Image: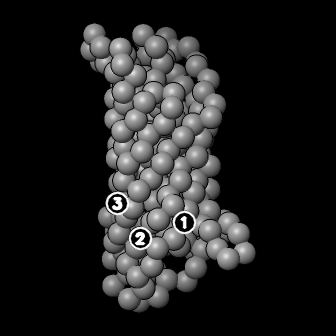
Amino acid sequence: MKPTCGRYLGVVAVLLAAVGLGQAAAAGEDTTITAFVPWQGQGRTYQTGPKEAEFIGAIVGPVYTETDKGPIASGVMECPASLTIGLQDGRQTGTGRCLITAKDGSRIYAEVNCKGVFMVGCDGDVKLTGGSGRFEGISGGGPVLIRSNLRQIVSTADGSVGEQGTGILYMRALHYKLP
């Protein structure tokens, strides 16, 4: 069994939280931002069928939001994720549930879904599902691109394949609204 692209999945989800973390949230705010997360991930890949494998793991990284003065650090994203990989055609489908924590402790919760090709990338959508602190009641979402640039295979004793990787999660048009 070939190891899968777990790193892509981590991908997924979390970036969304980037949603304006570096700025004070205002009641009734309705805006679109650009955010990205250079992530590091790790997990394990299991062969789950004759032509399929499943990566289970997490990605973590700092969230940056784009401003007129360039990117600013806005918080941290953590996303447990899973990725189903076709062993014959390399197609992959990923999902993740993410937590983004701003510098002041306020949180954004998000879901990420994507499809793509193993060792190439994953494109999909992020959906903001709630928040706490200044992000209480947040909603929104947008397109997400997840790419990886480094992958390391680690041997395990249980028949799975351990993986570590790095990459970027990019949200070019993340729309959000606060009540």
Quarter holding the C terminus? bottom left
Residue type at numbered disc 1: Thr
Q: Earlier in the sequence, mark 1 or mark 3?
A: 1
Q: Secondary structure at mark 1?
A: strand
Q: Position of residue 165 (x, y in %)?
A: 59, 33
Q: Which residue is mark 1?
A: 34
Asked if residue 94 is positioned above or below residue 157 in the image, the reply reads below
Please identify the quarter of the rendering in which residue 45 is found: top left
Of tags 3 and 2, the one toward the viewer is 2
The residue pinned by badge 2 equals 175
Disc 3 marks which residue? Answer: 127
The local crowd at label 2, few if under 14, some if 14 to 19, many if 20 or more residues have their Cα within 10 Å, is many
Going by the numbered disc 3, the residue's amino acid type is Lys
Would you say the residues marked 3 and 2 are in contact, meaning their CB atoms lie under 8 Å apart?
Answer: no
Determine the secondary structure under disc 3: strand
Q: Assess disc 1: are there few (<14), some (14-19) or many (≥20) residues with their C-alpha within 10 Å of its C-alpha.
A: some
